[in-house]
Image: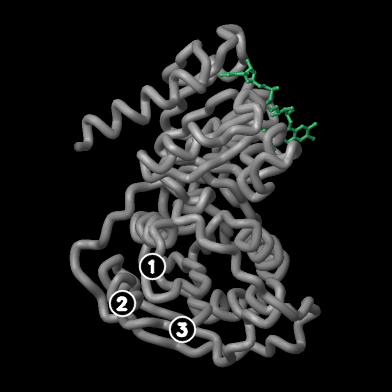
Amino acid sequence: MATVLVFIDNPGDQLAKANQELLTLAAAAGEPAVALNGPLHDSVEATMAEYGVHHIYRPAVEELDDYLVAPKAAYLAAAAGQAQPAAVLLDNTFEGKEIAGRLGIKLGSGVVTDVTAVSGSGSGLTATKSVLAGGYTVESTVSTGIPVLTVKPNTVAPSPAGAATEPEKTVIEVDAASQPAARITGVEERPASGRPALADAGIIVSGGRGTNGDFGPIEALADELGAAVGASRAATDAGWIEHSAQVGQTGQTVSPQLYVSAGISGAIQQKAGMQTAKVIVAVNKDEDSPVFEIADFGVVGDLFEVLPQATEEIRKRRS
Ligand SMILES: Cc1cc2nc3c(=O)[nH]c(=O)nc-3n(C[C@H](O)[C@H](O)[C@H](O)COP(=O)(O)OP(=O)(O)OC[C@H]3O[C@@H](n4cnc5c(N)ncnc54)[C@H](O)[C@@H]3O)c2cc1C
C-alpha cells in the first residue's frame, strides 16, 4: 500500500486533534508514516501506533526549532526522499503552508493549501477547497510530483485504525545551519486564555463591530460552549480584541463544526475565512445583512439580548 507521509511539528506529550485528523486522512488514503520534528513522547508514539503509523522519521539534529521554516522544509524533503510517499499532508497553519510551499519546490510537486476535504487514495488524492473569497468550491488533483496538501482542522473525525502498529524509526540527516534561514533569537509565550486555539477549535463564537467593543457576551457564550473567540477585522482594527482573533481573508481561515457570528455583517472578506464551517449561526439586528445568505440558522435581533439568553439556556440545560 502507498505511504502517505504526515508532517507533525513538536506535538508535546499529547497528539493534537488536528494531527490525529491528518493521520486519519493518511490512513484512509494509504499507509500513514510520520515525519516528526521535536521530542517523541511515549504517549504520542502510542497514539501514532493507534492511528496505524508504520514508520516515524526524526531529524538527526535538534536545531530545527532555532530557525524559521527553511530547515524544516529541508528535513521534510529528506524524509520524503526516504519514505517515497504517494502524498504528503501538513497542517494548515501559516508555518505549515510555508513549509508546504518550500517542499513543493524541493520535490517539484504541486501543492494545495486550505484543503477542507480529501478523497481518493495514494497519489490520486482529490483535494477540496473554497476559492475566490469563498465564492466557489473546487476539487483538484495534483498532476505533477507527489501531492503536498495542507489540510484545515475539522475536516474529518479522528478515528484510530483497527489494530495498533509498532512504528519503525529512521533518523534523517539534515544540516539545519546550511539552509538560508532566519534564526529565531527570542520567543515570548502568550499568556494562555484557557480557551481552545482559534485555528483548530470545534466551535467558534465571533464578534464584530456590532459588539461596539464589548466582547463580554461573546466570551460568555464561548466559555459556556468551550469555544474559541473570533472577530471581524472591524473589531480587531478597532483594538477591541487582538489581531490573532481575526477571521477572514487577511486573518485566519477556520472550519469549525459550529461558527456563531454576532454583530458581523458578513462581508466577502469575512466569509472567506469561515464559510466552510459545518453549521453557521448568525445573530444580527439587520435582517438584510449578507451574513444571513450563508447562515444555517439566523436570529434577527440585538446580540446583547440574544447571546445572554442563549448562554443562560445552555447553562440551564447542562446543570
Ligand atoms: C483587503 C481587505 C481584506 C479584509 N480582510 C478581512 C478579514 O480578514 N476579516 C474580516 O472580517 N474583514 C476583512 N475585511 C473588512 C471587511 O470588508 C469588512 O469591513 C469587515 O468584515 C466588517 O466587519 P463587521 O462585519 O464587524 O462590521 P460592519 O460591516 O460594520 O457590520 C456590523 C454588523 O453588526 C450589526 N449590528 C450592529 N449592532 C448590533 C447588535 N447590537 N446586535 C446584532 N447585530 C448588530 C449590523 O447590522 C452590521 O451588520 C477586509 C477588507 C479588505 C479591503
Categorize mark 1 by other alpha carbons within 10 Å: few (<14), some (14-19), many (20+).
some
Alpha carbon separation for disc pair 1 and 2: 8 Å
In this view, 280 is above or below 164:
above
Is residue 258 at least partly visible in the picture? yes
Categorize mark 2 by other alpha carbons within 10 Å: few (<14), some (14-19), many (20+).
few
Residue in the image at 52% along x and 48% along y = 198
Residue in the image at 70% along x and 36% along y = 233
Rendered-image quadrant of the C terminus: top left
Q: Say which amino acid is labelled 2.
A: Ser
Alpha carbon separation for disc pair 1 and 3: 12 Å
In this view, 173 is above or below 222:
below
Q: Residue furthest top?
A: 288
**Secondary structure beneath disc 1?**
loop
The disc, 1 or 3, on the residue closer to the chain's N-terminal end is 1
In this view, 54 is above or below 98:
below
**For residue 254, side relative to residue 71 (left or right):** left
Alpha carbon separation for disc pair 2 and 3: 11 Å
Expressed as whole percent of the image width and height from the top left, the position of residue 92 reads: 57, 54
201 or 286: which is nearer to us?
A: 286
**Secondary structure beneath disc 2?**
helix
Expressed as whole percent of the image width and height from the top left, the position of residue 131 reads: 64, 35
Q: In which quarter of the image is residue 181?
A: bottom right
Numbered-mark total: 3
In this view, 82 is above or below 263:
below
* Residue under label 3: 39
* Residue under label 2: 43
Callout 1–callout 2 Cβ contact below 8 Å: yes
Q: Quadrant of ligand 1?
A: top right
* Residue under label 1: 15
